[in-house]
């Protein structure tokens, strides 16, 4: 009997890992966006039938491991076995969620419990997304709502409450489906409560989205994106610069002058203050284009903000007269890719993968740059570098500071052939919809893409197999969105719901344990209020 119980426990453990991995299919590259609305159902059904709170905690943790590994599997070439260590640590965030699912959705279903599950299960998931969005824990990569980056109604919802509100709704739908599958058909009130709750929530969000203020589209900016492709081997830094220069000149010979030229992340491998020859070549390109260039410098220098020597990643604006003085040093670095958290403790990661051998330095504050020359002089751009485009608060801050256009410079050269380039590019659609501003996602090796102020694509993207350029007629926008005004309000609402539930549960436990509290005697066929059993 015990051996059979062990087999069951191991089977459930394996099922938890597999169920947690399923939502990865909703993200690019598979992009099965519709699958996100049912991807959590197997995991939810497993958790609600956990035989004990301890098992629910364990299966929540194991599912979290499966989710983190599946969504970040493309990091294996860089981190190797250390990815499993990180997944095991971050997977612990889902352990309390497993307990929560069992508590509110397990056992005999009732209408009140179904309604509580529809609120608390999504709220618990959102709390996890909030915690793991901290840059020190890897940042907000793989937020469930981001799977809806190409769905028009979801983008409209993102303009109201950001990717957070989209995640909340996706998990709520999963919870409703799980309840409908798990509840016996005879329990009509429970089914009705689940359906009514889901419909009411969807209707409320749809109404708010329909009437919410959005950006007013008008004007625009002509942007030339340069994608040099993979350049490896000796002197790759210099040869990448040369190729970017040739591609830019070739595009200018065959097309009208743009308002802005954008190169990708790490497109310049030396500090322009130390290499006047490179600075002059860029200024010559700007004069030829009649518009400034936004390049990205990845080099050792003394950062103007910090004043300390080290390696910075910086967006630098170069005009026809040379550097304009506008420079943004990347603030949020990629854990292990650009720095090792707690290096004295975790520095061994450099020996098992391609973790950063030296920590790069951070910038101090965001920067909004004003274009000095060209047909769009005076336009204001907000630069982001690499995975900073995953952080909703950064693009929101830039728009509040007056940015007309967001530009994300990226390089996914190390992850060609994986899901990473498509996943990264898709994030720009969410940032555009949230902020009500167009976003240019320019990379070295693809995918480069542009999204308008509603999150819809502008023109065709440059894929990972493309070496070349593209000119995009980027629509402008004014006005603001509710997300820019009010920020992450769905997150605070979710935390408030969890806090209220915790207080109510604690009060109920206190009442039950209070002196003099007597449990009601159960009735039997031989006992009733009028005739007690002997």
Image (cartoon, helix red, strand yellow):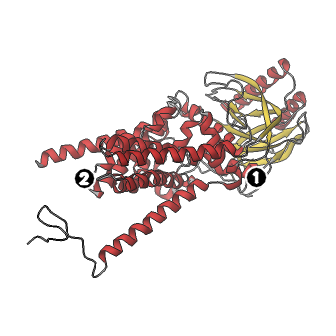
Q: Is residue 361 left or right of residue 422?
A: right
Residue drawn at x 52%, y 30% as measured from the top left: 31
Q: At which x and y percent is residue 319?
A: 87, 38
Above or below, comparing residue 151 to residue 378 in the picture: above
Residue 85 % position (x, y)? 41, 48
Q: Nearer the viewer, residue 14 or 315?
A: 14
The residue furthest top is 254
**Dot 1 corresponds to which residue?**
400
**Depth check: 511 or 287 in front?**
511
Tell me residue 309's x, y (percent): 70, 54
Give the residue drawn at x 66%, y 42%: 210
Which of the pair 350/531 is nearer the observer? Answer: 531
- Name the residue at the left extreme: 534
Is residue 192 left or right of 164 when viewed as pictured?
left
Foreground residue among 139 and 145: 145
The number of numbered badges drawn on the structure is: 2
The residue at the point 72 percent across, 31 percent down is: 238
Q: Please identify the quarter of the rendering in which residue 66 is found.
A: top left
Q: Pointer 2: what residue?
A: 51
């Amino acid at each position: 009997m015990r051996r059979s119980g062990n087999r069951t426990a191991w089977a459930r453990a394996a099922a938890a890992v597999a169920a947690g991995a399923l939502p990865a299919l909703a993200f690019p590259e598979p992009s099965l966006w519709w699958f996100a609305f049912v991807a959590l159902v197997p995991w939810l059904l497993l958790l609600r039938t956990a035989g004990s709170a301890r098992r629910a905690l364990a299966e929540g943790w194991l599912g979290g491991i499966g989710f983190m590994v599946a969504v970040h599997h493309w990091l294996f070439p860089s981190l190797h076995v250390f990815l499993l260590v990180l997944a095991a640590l971050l997977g612990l965030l889902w352990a309390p969620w497993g307990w929560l699912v069992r508590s509110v959705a397990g056992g005999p279903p009732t209408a009140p419990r179904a309604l509580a599950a529809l609120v608390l299960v999504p709220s618990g998931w959102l709390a996890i997304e909030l915690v793991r969005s901290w840059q020190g824990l890897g940042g907000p990569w793989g937020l469930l709502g981001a799977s809806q980056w190409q769905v028009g109604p979801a983008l409209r919802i993102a303009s109201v409450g950001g990717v957070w509100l989209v995640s909340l709704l996706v998990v709520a739908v999963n919870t409703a489906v799980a309840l409908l599958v798990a509840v016996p058909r005879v329990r009509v009130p429970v089914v009705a409560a689940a359906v009514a709750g889901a419909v009411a929530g969807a209707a409320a969000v749809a109404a708010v989205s329909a009437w919410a203020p959005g950006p007013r589209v008008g004007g625009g900016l002509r942007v030339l994106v340069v994608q040099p492709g993979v350049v490896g081997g000796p002197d790759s830094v210099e040869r990448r610069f040369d190729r970017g220069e040739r591609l830019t000149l070739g595009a200018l010979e065959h097309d009208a002058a743009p308002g802005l030229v954008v190169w990708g992340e790490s497109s310049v491998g030396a500090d322009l203050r130390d290499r006047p020859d490179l600075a002059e070549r860029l200024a010559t390109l700007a004069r030829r284009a009649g518009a400034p260039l936004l390049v990205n410098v990845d080099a050792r220098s003394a950062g103007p903000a910090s004043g300390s020597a080290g390696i910075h990643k910086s967006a630098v604006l170069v005009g026809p007269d040379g550097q304009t003085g506008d420079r943004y040093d990347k603030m949020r670095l990629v854990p292990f890719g650009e720095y090792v958290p707690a290096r004295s403790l975790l520095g061994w990661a450099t020996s098992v993968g391609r973790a950063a051998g030296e920590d790069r330095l951070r910038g101090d504050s965001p920067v909004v740059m004003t274009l000095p020359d060209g047909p769009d002089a005076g336009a204001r751009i907000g630069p982001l570098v690499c995975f900073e485009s995953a952080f909703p608060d950064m693009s929101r801050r830039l728009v509040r500071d007056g940015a007309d256009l967001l530009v994300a410079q990226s390089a996914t050269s190390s992850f060609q052939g994986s899901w990473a380039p498509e996943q990264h590019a898709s994030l720009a659609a969410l940032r555009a919809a949230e902020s009500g501003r167009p976003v240019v996602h320019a990379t070295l090796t693809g995918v480069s893409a542009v999204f308008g102020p509603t999150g819809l694509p502008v023109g065709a993207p440059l894929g990972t197999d493309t070496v070349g350029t593209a000119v995009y007629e980027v629509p402008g926008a004014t006005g603001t969105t509710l997300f820019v005004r009010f920020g992450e309000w769905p997150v605070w609402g979710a935390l408030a719901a969890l806090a209220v539930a915790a207080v109510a549960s604690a009060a109920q436990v206190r009442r039950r344990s209070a002196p003099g509290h007597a449990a009601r005697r159960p009735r039997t066929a031989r006992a009733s209020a009028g005739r007690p059993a002997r």
